[in-house]
Image (spheres, grey):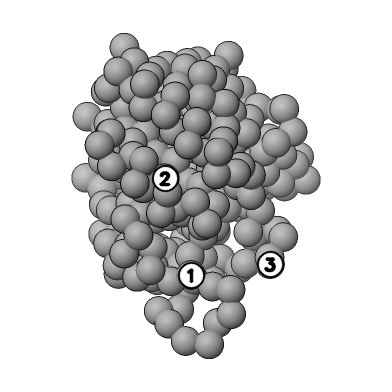
């Protein structure tokens, strides 16, 4: 059975005081989601602080981005080795905002995926279609093309130590949410695609849904058979709401 997983992506938000308060409130509430693996991905500058604050809790820490390079003259970049040394457990790769705002190609995403795994990090590979692609009936084609680029570089066995996150771009930060049926359809497509190559890996692979997840819609989304949790944006900055989302995975 796949353990539920909820990861909060804080994006470029927060400050030191607010971070301390948010983590303290989450730790206080963690008894309500003891059966769910929970992680938070703060901005780089707060990673050390959050790792220390979470040290005696079950909450794990991840990063929002990683360089595909191990070291060198890459101003502003942070390597997987550096993240691992700071105590990060996960790293997001291929988030739609990285693809769109920073023109990251699927090939670059595949390189980042491999770099993360080489240093013991669990990559959370984000996949998703734009509204235009959905309206043209290209959802399946789009997400599988993104997935196949990583599969071609890493091989299906690499997905035994990774997480997928389906994030319809049209639902991120817009207040719109894919219906449970729409989300389940894409999650099933992704799992079946992996299963064609390795059924055991597919069966164990956790696939998260991301796209305006809130405490009011989490339970019905997470009740779908191929949705194993959520990649949560804005709602992860509100301790009460994020804790409620995490608790919605509990039976």
Answer with the quarter of the image where residue 74 lies: bottom right
Residue 193, how many percent across, how many down? 40, 48
- Tell me the SS state at disc 3: loop
Give the foreground label among 3 and 2: 2
Depth check: 57 or 182 in front?
A: 57
**Count of numbered labels shown in the rendering:** 3
Answer with the quarter of the image where residue 77 lies: bottom right
Depth check: 67 or 48 in front?
A: 48
- Tell me the SS state at disc 1: loop
Q: Residue at x 43, y 71 (%)?
A: 79
- Tell me the SS state at disc 2: helix
Give the foreground label among 1 and 3: 1
Q: Residue at x 36, y 48 (%)?
A: 51
Residue 68, how many percent across, how many down? 47, 74
Answer with the quarter of the image where residue 75 lies: bottom right
Q: Residue at x 36, y 40 (%)?
A: 53
Q: Is residue 251 visible?
A: yes
Question: 63 above or below 174?
Answer: below
Position of the N terminus, as image quadrant, is top left
Image disc number at residue 103: 3
Residue density around tag 1, few if under 14, some if 14–19, many if 20 or more, within 10 Å: some
Looking at this view, name the residue that lies furthest to the front. Answer: 17
Say which label, 2 or 1, has the lower sequence index.
2
Q: CA distance from mark 3 to mark 2?
A: 29 Å
Q: Are marks 3 and 2 in contact (CB under 8 Å)?
A: no
Image disc number at residue 78: 1
Residue that label 2 marks: 50
Q: Are marks 1 and 3 in contact (CB under 8 Å)?
A: no
Depth check: 67 or 145 in front?
A: 67
């Amino acid at each position: 059975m796949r353990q539920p997983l909820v990861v909060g992506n804080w994006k470029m938000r927060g400050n030191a005081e607010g971070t301390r308060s948010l983590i303290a409130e989450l730790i206080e509430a963690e008894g309500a989601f003891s059966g769910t693996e929970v992680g938070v991905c703060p901005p780089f500058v707060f990673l050390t602080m959050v790792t220390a604050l979470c040290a005696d809790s079950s909450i794990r820490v991840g990063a929002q981005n990683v360089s595909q390079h191990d070291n060198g003259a890459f101003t502003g970049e942070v390597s997987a080795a550096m993240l691992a040394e700071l105590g990060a457990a996960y790293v997001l790769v291929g988030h739609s905002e990285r693809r769109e705002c920073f023109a990251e190609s699927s090939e670059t995403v595949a390189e980042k995926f491999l770099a993360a795994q080489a240093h013991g990090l669990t990559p959370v590979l984000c996949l998703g279609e734009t509204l235009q692609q959905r309206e043209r009936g290209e959802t399946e084609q789009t997400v599988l093309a993104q997935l196949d680029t990583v599969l071609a570089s890493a091989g299906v066995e690499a997905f035994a130590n990774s997480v997928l996150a389906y994030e319809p771009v049209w639902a991120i930060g817009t207040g719109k949410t894919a219906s449970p049926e729409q989300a389940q359809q894409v999650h099933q497509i992704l799992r079946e695609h992996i299963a064609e190559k390795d059924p055991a890996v597919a069966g164990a692979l956790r696939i998260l849904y991301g796209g305006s997840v809130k405490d009011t819609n989490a339970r019905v989304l997470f009740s779908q058979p191929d949705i194993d949790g959520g990649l949560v944006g804005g709602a992860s900055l509100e301790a009460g709401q994020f804790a409620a989302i995490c608790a919605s995975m509990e039976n």
